[in-house]
Image: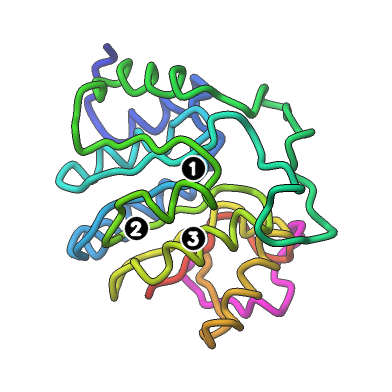
Amino acid sequence: MKIITTYEDLVQDLIDNKITMVRPDEFKTIFKHYPKISEVEGDVVECGVWRGGFSIFLSYIFQDKNVWVCDSYEGFQPVEIAKHSYDRERHTNHVTHNAVGPLAISLEEVQSHFKTYGLGDEERIKFLKGFVKDTLPTSGIEKIALLRIDVDAYSATLETLEELYDKVQPGGYIIFDDSCLYETLDAIKTFFKQKNLPEFINHPVTDQPLNINLRHTNDDSGLPAGCYTIK
């Protein structure tokens, strides 16, 4: 078991050992907004966890909350079974690797990483296996303080929002790891229009509200990764 002395050391260790692909600025978002998030009633939920690194970090920093670690643990959802059709979907079951390595990480491997960081036997950490459209409706998740969505695809992002947005409590945060991807941004636009929500999300570093219909960066979607909104 690793001995972690500070949260900053934990973040660096997770990055160095490729337990996470999350950029350092997204960890800073949690550090900066921790006091507000911790005051919101509800659980912490991450959908799309890869090797579990960011969920491990969330389990450390929110020690008084349940943490849901949700993933198919078998890669991306086939477009044929997706709830929503989208002709620009790139992340399908045919995408199995990226520059960091395999994308379909088993539940057993993720649980082993939790054990490595001393989080193997805590009842508050709940692993949810399966595609979000199948697992979230009957998950038992009731109230959410922080929802982090990292599922890369249009349908899966929209499915997650449809199932969990109403469970996010007032003042709760939703972080979009993939706000830099056009398919994720398209899902956000679709959902925000359906719910008649203000069409802005916040920059992960500056906290500046960004109009989701405008290009602000050179990223794929015109927005940076890790943008967030507060309910």
Residue at x 52%, y 22% (from the top left corner): 106
Where does the image place residue 205, in percent across and percent down from the top left?
A: 49, 60
Give the extent of the magenta segment.
204-220
User: How many marks can you see?
Assistant: 3
Q: CA distance from mark 2 to mark 1?
A: 18 Å
Q: Which residue is mark 3?
A: 205
Identity of the amino acid at label 3? Val
Identity of the amino acid at label 2? Leu
Q: Which residue occupies the foreground of this view, 132 or 14?
A: 132
For residue 24, side relative to residue 32 (left or right): right
The numbered mark, 3 or 2, whose residue comes first in the sequence reads 2
Q: CA distance from mark 1 to mark 3?
A: 10 Å
Above-or-below relation of 62 to 184: above
Q: CA distance from mark 3 to mark 2?
A: 17 Å
For mark 2, give the secondary structure.
strand
Q: For the view shown, which residue lies furthest in the left direction?
A: 64
